[in-house]
Image: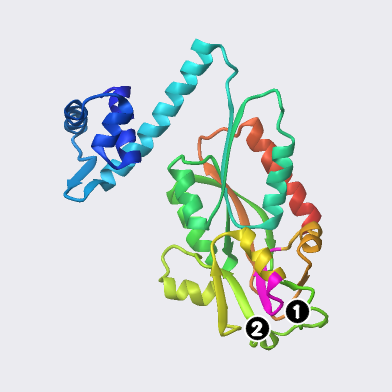
């Protein structure tokens, strides 16, 4: 196995075609097929499944390609540093829960990046289980996950099993977020029953280990309303809440700047007693970089201001 064979496999996976990959690599298709066959034989796995409809990647192939991409990236970085005399890039990667205060912290973190230092920054918002998977697989170095405190034992067990360090950032109860034009916007004490006639916006992909999805939905997706809009992308929630004055959403505390920008208000609801935790995770043995420390500092500062 050599670095060229890895590059060949990655190119085939990207193009989903041996002929197209051979064209991009400026080599003959038979030679490329022969190289991939040799790679598979050396590894003792099947990377690609050939069908009449084209090329698909096997589960073993997916795992191999993750390693191959990281190795290729590291080799290219070394070559760039030593052959071309360029400065080593600072790298930062994080998967986080969908929270306005975290995105506010990330914006401040990005603002403070040195203009004189090359850097590659990866930032993704997703649910807790995908974040854990990405950290464990080294697709990112930091994660911030969110879960209801009722599920503490499931996540504590997972942290131990997956060999993850974990530190609680904050605990809070969700607040109601709605347009200033919402019929309940001026109501001082909102009760759960008051929400039944309105549209609830929810993130569509909550997931808790060891629980059936039906039970998770009962725990995480409320039945206060019979009209729901499920979304994956956090930014859309603000536009929906601004444009649909009969909609509402349960959220972690939101910065005043965003409330003003989208003409929104956030309201407490005394009947909502569920407690949530935002938790920082990273692999045991991983040494936090200066960029990691900077981001964590900004998250804690944003939390202090908003919470």
**Foreground residue among 37 and 188:** 37
Above or below for 93 versus 23 = below
In the image, is 213 to the left or to the right of 3? right
Name the residue beneath numbered marker 1: 182
Few, some or many residues within 10 Å of mark 1 (<14, 14–19, 20+): many
Pick the quarter of the image with the C terminus.
Answer: bottom right
For the point 58% across and 15% down, which residue is it? 86
Name the residue beneath numbered marker 2: 198
**Foreground residue among 157 and 196:** 196
Few, some or many residues within 10 Å of mark 2 (<14, 14–19, 20+): some
Provide residue 84's location: percent of width, then percent of height: 52, 12
Task: Check residue 132 for magenta coloring.
Answer: no
Extent of the magenta region: 243-252
| CB under 8 Å between discs 1 and 2 | yes
- Mark found first going from the N terminus, 1 or 2: 1
CA–CA distance in space, label 1 to label 2: 9 Å
In the image, is 94 to the left or to the right of 26? right
In the image, is 218 to the left or to the right of 248? left
Pick the quarter of the image with the N terminus.
Answer: top left
**Foreground residue among 302 and 154:** 302
Provide residue 209's location: percent of width, then percent of height: 44, 62
**How many badges with numbers are in the image?**
2
């Amino acid at each position: 196995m050599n670095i060229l064979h890895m590059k060949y496999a990655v190119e085939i996976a990207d193009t989903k075609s041996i002929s197209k990959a051979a064209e991009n690599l400026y080599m003959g298709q038979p030679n490329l097929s022969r190289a991939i066959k040799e790679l598979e034989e050396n590894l003792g796995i099947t990377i690609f499944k050939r069908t009449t409809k084209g090329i698909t990647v096997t589960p073993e192939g997916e795992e191999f390609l993750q390693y191959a991409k990281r190795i290729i990236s590291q080799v290219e970085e070394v070559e760039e540093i030593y052959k071309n005399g360029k400065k080593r890039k600072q790298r930062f990667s994080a998967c986080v829960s969908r929270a306005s205060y975290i995105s506010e912290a990330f914006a401040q973190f990005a603002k403070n990046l040195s203009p004189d230092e090359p850097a590659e920054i990866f930032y993704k918002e997703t649910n807790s289980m995908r974040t854990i998977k990405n950290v464990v697989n080294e697709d990112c170095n930091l994660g911030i996950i969110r879960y209801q405190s009722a599920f503490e034992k499931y996540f504590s067990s997972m942290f131990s099993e997956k060999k993850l360090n974990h530190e609680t950032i904050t605990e809070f109860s969700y607040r109601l977020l709605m347009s200033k034009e919402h019929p309940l916007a001026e109501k001082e004490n909102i009760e759960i029953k008051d929400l039944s006639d309105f549209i609830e916006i929810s993130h569509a992909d909550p997931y808790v280990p060891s629980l059936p999805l039906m039970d998770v939905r009962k725990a995480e997706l409320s039945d206060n309303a019979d009209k729901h809009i499920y979304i994956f992308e956090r930014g859309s929630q603000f536009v929906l809440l601004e444009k649909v004055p009969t909609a509402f959403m349960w959220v972690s505390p939101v910065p005043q700047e965003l409330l003003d920008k989208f003409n929104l208000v956030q309201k407490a609801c005394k009947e909502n007693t569920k407690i949530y935790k935002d938790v920082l995770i990273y692999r045991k043995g991983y040494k936090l970089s200066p960029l990691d420390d900077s981001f964590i500092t900004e998250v804690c500062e944003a939390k202090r201001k908003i919470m």
